[in-house]
Amino acid sequence: MTRTSVYSALILKTKASGESNRELWMLTAEEGILRATMFGGPKSRLRSHVSPFHSGRVWIYHDPVRDTRKLSDFDVLSWRPGLRELYERTMTADAIAETILASYGSGGNWETALSLTEQTFDSLEIAGEELCRRIFIFFLWQWGSLLGIQPDMENCTLCGEKIDINQILRYSLTHNAFCCSSCVHSESAHFIEVNPGCRRWLTAIQALSPAQLSRYTMDEKSMREAKNVTQAILSGAIQKRPLSWDW
């Protein structure tokens, strides 16, 4: 029985291990998050290939006795050098990677998770500073949908009534749900306000690919609200707020 498996994978994180080895974490379409060791010094071909945000096919040797994995080979199909050419791109990519790791690679829908992440990184590679912010919000919103935690914006969770598109929403941190203005007081610390412009933007991007996002802009106020509410939804699900979100 072969102990080597081939995966479609995206490198999320690497860390030095010992004098010349590296520990790496990757998102795979077949088994979700995998951790493996790459052996080899500075002259190793794999050393230059195995970097965060590279994706392609990886060969992993699994030792069932020790339950350890070793990276045997990596055929890089996407290098994405543009992610390192702008500070905002790098920080956004790091924040996305940490979000994926914190949520265990989406918890089961790995092929879709990998596709969404690769498409997001491809769009991020050519994005300007402002678009980087929108791409990150887009990813958090779509990732929430993938995890099954994206709340309904159509109906109030408290009274059950349909919420008019021109009405301000209140996101409940306690219930992970949206409420109408009639059911809550705007000064309550347990709610995040979402204005109609922000709501329309979040609704519009639901069916978009990351490459289409550049056509859907929004004002600064709406962007702040979208950032606050998407981060609140995800941090509630993963039970922490990653520091990388604060770039």
Image: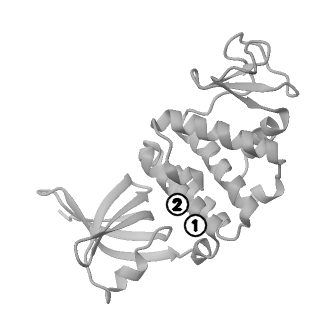
Q: In the rendered view, tell whether residue 20 sits above or below residue 120.
A: below
- Which residue is denoted by mark 1 in the rendering? 90
Q: Position of residue 128 (x, y in %)?
A: 74, 67
Instruction: Look at the numbered disc 2 and give the secondary structure of its residue.
Output: helix
Q: Position of residue 187 (x, y in %)?
A: 73, 21
**Quarter of the image where the C terminus is located:** bottom right
Q: Which residue type carries mark 2? A: Asp
Find the residue positioned furthest to the left: 65
Give the residue displayed 79% in from the left and 13% down from the top.
182
Check if mark 1's residue and mark 2's residue have beta carbons within 8 Å: yes
Instruction: Look at the numbered disc 1 and give the secondary structure of its residue.
Output: helix
- Which residue is denoted by mark 2 in the rendering? 94
Whether residue 209 can be seen here: no
> Is 9 placed left or right of 159 in the picture?
left
Q: Nearer the viewer, residue 78 or 14?
A: 14
Give the residue displayed 80% in from the left and 42% down from the top.
221
Q: Which residue type carries mark 1? A: Thr
Give the residue displayed 22% in from the left and 72% down from the top.
18
Residue 151 found in image quarter: top right
